[in-house]
Image (cartoon, helix red, strand yellow):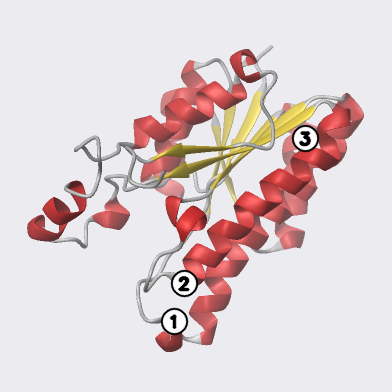
Amino acid sequence: MRKTALVTGGTGGIGEAICRKLAWDGYFVIINFTRSIEKAESLAAEIGGIPCGFDVSDRDAVNAAISDVNEKHGSVELLVNNAGVSEIDLFTHIPTDISDRIMNINLNGTLNCSRAVLPAMISRKSGCIINISSMWGQCGASCEVDYSASKAGIIGFTKALAKEVGLSGIRVNCVSPGFILTEMNSRFSPDELEAIREEIPLGIFGKPDHVADAVSFLASAHAEFITGQNLAVNGGMVI
């Protein structure tokens, strides 16, 4: 019987790559989405998973959705908290509603989903949670202050929760991607992209599959003795 994995934000560039990789690894993948229902349904049909629509920032909706998943498909054994949003502007210019949205989806969404899956994991004495942060959560980025704060919070959350649930056989780790070529970064001009590439020691851009491979490793038996860690996937841009 396949283990059940839930990937939040599963229809984005990185999320889709994670879903595909976990399905290849043998997981039954629950693909979370908020608006992209057609893409979620198409991906689910392709990899043998199911779409699951809910807003990670809505704690009641999260609890209801995960309760339904547990009842119909068995309890979630791997949670990948990938859902996230960003906004580029001066810290003093970010409207309150956008600032709240960034924090509610990126950080509170991670907390909400983790709280919802943990009771079954604790009862089973096994489970794995992998949070997707960012290199800006490690060092901060000008004009992405709210985003950086939310992602730094995810790293701190990872370390604290790993200590709390380790005795229950649950591992909690984090992946911090660098500059990954996704639709989110399509706003950059060719000249801007070249300037960014020159700042990456390996001289190449990250791909969604690079992040998916890191998630796959941390979810596997090869990482049995790894918890509370932040794996940077950034080509050496932040060390």
Most extreme residue toward the front, as rendered? Answer: 239
Which residue in the structure is indicated by mark 1? 91
Q: Identify residue type, mark 1.
A: Phe
Residue type, numbered disc 3? Asn
Instruction: Write the residue at 48% across / 29% down.
Output: 214
The spot of residue 154 in percent (x, y) is 62, 53
Q: Residues within 10 Å of mark 1 (few under 14, many from 20)?
A: some
Where is residue 202, by image quadrant? top left
Mark 3 lies on residue: 70
Can you say which quadrant of the picture contains the C terminus? top left
Residue at (80% x, 24% y) in the render = 126
Is residue 204 shown left or right of residue 95? Answer: left
Report whether 108 appears left or right of 169.
left
In the rendered view, tell whether residue 225 sits above or below residue 1. Answer: below
The span from disc 1 to disc 3 (Cα, nearest Å) is 40 Å
Q: Residue at x 33, y 46 (%)?
A: 237
Which tag, 1 or 3, sits closer to the chain's start?
A: 3
Task: Answer with the quarter of the image where residue 103 lies.
Answer: bottom right
Q: Residues within 10 Å of mark 2 (few under 14, many from 20)?
A: many
Q: Could you say whether the residue bearing mark 3 is in a helix, strand or loop?
A: helix
Q: Quadrant of the N terminus?
A: top right
Q: Nearer the viewer, residue 9 or 132?
A: 132
Which disc number belongs to residue 99? none
Q: Percent x, y for residue 79?
A: 65, 37
Residue tagged by mark 2?
Answer: 145
User: Residues at badges 1 and 2 in contact (C-beta under 8 Å)?
Assistant: yes
Which label lies toward us, 1 or 3?
Answer: 1
